[in-house]
Amino acid sequence: MYPEGEARIDPSHPRYISLRERELLVAGFKAGVVVPEGLIAHGRGEMFDYLFGEETLPLALTAERAAAAALLTAESPVISVNGNLAALCAEEVVQLAETTGARIEVNLFHWTEERTKSIRALLESKGAKDVLAECPDSFLEGVNHDRGKCHSDGIFSADTVLVPLEDGDRANALVEMGKTVISIDLNPISRTTLFSSISIVDEVMRAMPNLVRFSKELAGDEARAKSIIQSFDNAAALKDMYRLISERFAQLARP
Amino acid sequence: MYPEGEARIDPSHPRYISLRERELLVAGFKAGVVVPEGLIAHGRGEMFDYLFGEETLPLALTAERAAAAALLTAESPVISVNGNLAALCAEEVVQLAETTGARIEVNLFHWTEERTKSIRALLESKGAKDVLAECPDSFLEGVNHDRGKCHSDGIFSADTVLVPLEDGDRANALVEMGKTVISIDLNPISRTTLFSSISIVDEVMRAMPNLVRFSKELAGDEARAKSIIQSFDNAAALKDMYRLISERFAQLARP
């Protein structure tokens, strides 16, 4: 798809993931996988990650464990993949689909058949066997035109959908359709984060490997997975996140 | 340069400037004026603007008045123009150069002669008469290679430089060279904001027209301009900004 192994950034660099992400997104952009709007959206997330010290917060880790549990215990889980996610985490998408039995659906906000195809090809090059991509035959309820396109035996009929880097309107439509929605979004006050059932406020390149790891750990232990979901309180976790950001700025304001 | 009058967004839309900016940047990108990294950087700023309610804060307005005063009273002011600024505010750059007597210098972080030329042409199409662009003959002290390129009779010898959307290393180099540095950057904790003499934490598409307006108001009244500069305290203004952000998140954290 596009050249790998081109990293010129030293992995020991303290900002390695952040710098590597920019490289991957720009490469994905040149390959037709990422759209310009995706680059702007990525910048918005970067800003919050900077506030979080570019680390997975304990709060995010808790949400990631609950998300893995929810995917494992779902009847028909689906991982929704857009251009940015494909450019950043194609391998982890394939791994997570394998460990949780989720289907993969390419689902684009700026939809073109060609880009859908490029992303499917990229996922298949990482070992994906069953990717729903071209020719969506259904629509999300209440979302207009291209932006609502989806597959009837994928996202449309799923009970649980993982939406990394999702638009607020679409996340809301999925919730309204009665689904368990798991988002990955660095913005703790985005509409996607506010609407979701489980809101992972973390960088996708850190969150996705964590989801793979937790889903391996919890696989086969349904009782434990269900108890983790039971004890997870999304609204309380978000308020803790806001308190933490407030305290960071209060520190900066001190004389 | 690239088609104007294409705005499909209603100017009465509450998020008009933000949506219009994305359109302009994507158009600028397609025209070779904006680089992909510029789109990501714009996203980082968008995030803070969202926190500020997409409005110029009173604190920012105070900094804008001081910045206009500093440009007016400078011996040799220069406006540094990069791709994003050209895509968003070419007309205001030309107006501000006229009202303050500042020179315009195209100064790119991701430098190519071709892009320098495109940006000069864009500025000239808006009426700029004297743009320093191709063939930079000097370097910022301590900044390597292409990123330090500048003109000896522009930024290099200026006493006051307006750097909208500047990189931290370059802003620091200008300060180290003894210049008064005026930044426009939505990120209140960026290195550029922290290093600058006058840090305008505001959206460029709001800040630039304000700078034009204040420079017209203060033109010819040097005593008033000097008193405004005297009473401006950049460090105190930034701490007020942090306090404000802290309070916004504290509110969200309340039960």
Image (cartoon, coloured by chain):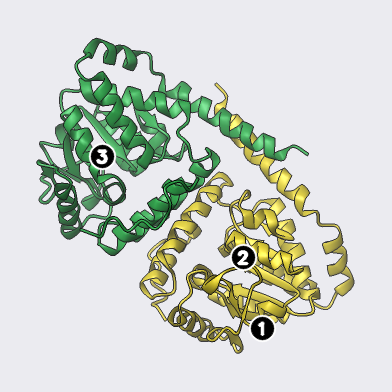
Chain colours: A yellow, B green
In screen coordinates, is A253 left or right of A22? right
Gap between marks 3 and 1, in whole Å?
A: 50 Å
Taking the spot 68% from the left edge, 82% from the top edge, the residue there is: A98
The C terminus of chain B sits in image quarter: top right
Q: Which mark is residue A152?
A: 1
The three-letter amino acid code for the residue at tag 1 is Ser
Query: Chain letter of disc 2?
Result: A
User: Alpha-carbon neighbours of circle 1 within 10 Å: few (<14), some, or many (≥20)?
Assistant: some
User: Alpha-carbon neighbours of circle 2 within 10 Å: few (<14), some, or many (≥20)?
Assistant: many
Query: Chain letter of disc 1?
Result: A
Gap between marks 2 and 1, in whole Å?
A: 16 Å
When asked about the image quadrant of residue B160, the answer is: top left
Q: Nearer the viewer, residue B155 or A168?
A: A168
x, y percent for residue B42 = 41, 50
Q: Which mark is residue B92?
A: 3
Q: Which residue is mark 2?
A: A170
The three-letter amino acid code for the residue at tag 3 is Glu
Taking the spot 60% from the left edge, 89% from the top edge, the residue there is: A129
